[in-house]
């Protein structure tokens, strides 16, 4: 039996990404949706990173974390969206075994890193609002780098464990992955191996990743809200609540979808695909919009960059006319 499973496992050279089970006519609409959202992700997150890097006024811990959040959003959506869009026009909808391993590894790496980054950003806001006089001391450059490096480190460890655990299984039941990208749960469905240990490892990783980050975020915002309520200025209260509510909105969408996908029993594959859209496409699209449109410093920096480019463009046109 063991030899047969090994043989079946070695015969798998590719998988088929089933995607959304809709009429072929809707594939064009889905493609346009993915294309539009992905274009906004590219524009928003690349733009955010450029603004943060080029404007010296944004050389603060909050924008350092925000720049890394944009980097993570950009890359994990890029791991998913291009392949999903190409499959809308492909008859085979196949992905190589190595491509599936790579997609799962990179996606897990960046999505876990994002969870830790959001917790770090909540802690950063807690220090800035509740202990403003100690902010520059407590959130030193060295500590900020450690926070970000730690986020990527834990993301890498989790991804390595999850990927190894998933792809040491035998896939003799089917090659069809009932999803639009390579994810752990759809892969477990087509495995003919004993899933007790993989399920336990997955549950353990979800517990030690989701619970601590959610606790940090909730506790940070409890202290933030209690501090904000003591502010006498209505305008000051409104400004802080506006910033914090946007952050909490992003966190709620991301964690709500992840909990639905990885914690709740896997009984609704089609709903899982819709939920996964929230953190593969919707959240990376919303993050730069929320943090830029609600942020005065970012809007001023963007206005400055656009003003320079417009001035340069007008100067070039004027020189050409003179010539």
Image (cartoon, rainbow, N blue to C red):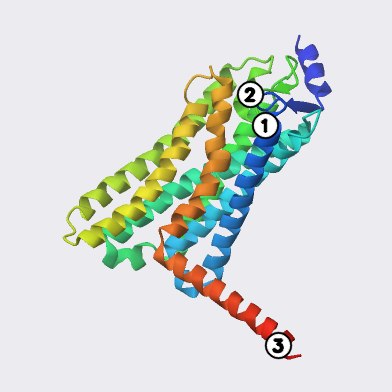
Vertical relation: 97 (above or below) 173: below
Q: Earlier in the sequence, mark 3 or mark 1?
A: 1
Lateral position of residue 16 relative to residue 234, left or right: right
Can residue 154 be seen by looking at this rendering? no
State the residue lying farthest toward the front.
Answer: 321
The residue that disc 3 covers is 319
Looking at the picture, how far across and down is residue 168, in whole percent?
Answer: 70, 25
Label 1: few (<14), some or many (≥20) within 10 Å? Answer: many
Q: Quadrant of the C terminus?
A: bottom right
- Distance, label 3 to label 2, CA atoms, is 60 Å
The picture quadrant where one finds residue 191 is top right
Mark 2 touches mark 1? (CB < 8 Å): yes
Closer to the camera: disc 3 or disc 2?
3
Lateral position of residue 187 relative to residue 291, left or right: right
Residue for point 56% across, 33% down: 276
Q: Nearer the viewer, residue 227 or 308?
A: 308
Kindly state the secondary structure of the residue where label 1 is placed. loop
Can residue 235 be seen by looking at this rendering? yes
Label 3: few (<14), some or many (≥20) within 10 Å? Answer: few
Label drawn at residue 209: none
- Distance, label 3 to label 1, CA atoms, is 53 Å
- Distance, label 2 to label 1, CA atoms, is 7 Å
Residue for point 44% across, 33% down: 256
């Amino acid at each position: 039996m063991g030899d047969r499973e090994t043989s079946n496992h070695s015969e798998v050279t590719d998988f088929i990404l089933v995607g959304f089970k809709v009429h072929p006519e809707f594939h064009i609409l889905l493609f346009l949706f993915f294309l539009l959202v992905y274009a906004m992700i590219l524009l928003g997150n690349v733009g955010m990173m450029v603004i943060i890097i080029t404007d010296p006024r944004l050389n603060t811990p909050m924008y350092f974390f925000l720049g890394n959040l944009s980097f993570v959003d950009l890359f994990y959506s890029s791991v998913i969206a291009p392949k999903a869009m190409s499959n809308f026009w492909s008859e085979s909808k196949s992905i190589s075994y190595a491509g599936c391993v790579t997609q799962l590894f990179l996606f897990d790496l960046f999505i876990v890193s994002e969870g830790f980054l959001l917790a770090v950003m909540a802690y950063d806001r807690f220090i800035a609002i509740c202990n403003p006089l100690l902010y520059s001391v407590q959130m030193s450059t060295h500590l900020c780098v450690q926070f970000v490096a730690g986020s990527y480190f834990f993301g890498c460890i989790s991804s390595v464990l999850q990927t190894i655990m998933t792809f040491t299984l035998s896939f003799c039941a089917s090659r069809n992955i009932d999803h639009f990208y390579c994810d752990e749960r759809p892969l477990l469905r087509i495995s003919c191996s004993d899933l007790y240990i993989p399920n336990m490892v997955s549950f353990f990783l979800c517990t030690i990743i989701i619970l601590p980050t959610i606790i940090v975020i909730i506790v940070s915002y409890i202290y933030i809200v209690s501090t904000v309520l003591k502010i006498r200025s209505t305008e000051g209260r409104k400004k802080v609540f506006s910033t914090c509510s946007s952050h909490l909105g992003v966190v709620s969408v991301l964690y709500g979808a992840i909990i639905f996908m990885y914690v709740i029993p896997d009984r609704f594959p089609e709903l899982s695909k819709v939920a996964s859209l929230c953190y593969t496409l919707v959240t990376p699209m919303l993050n730069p919009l929320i943090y830029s449109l609600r942020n005065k410093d970012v809007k001023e920096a963007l206005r400055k960059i656009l003003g320079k480019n417009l001035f340069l463009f007008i100067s070039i046109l004027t020189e050409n006319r003179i010539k």
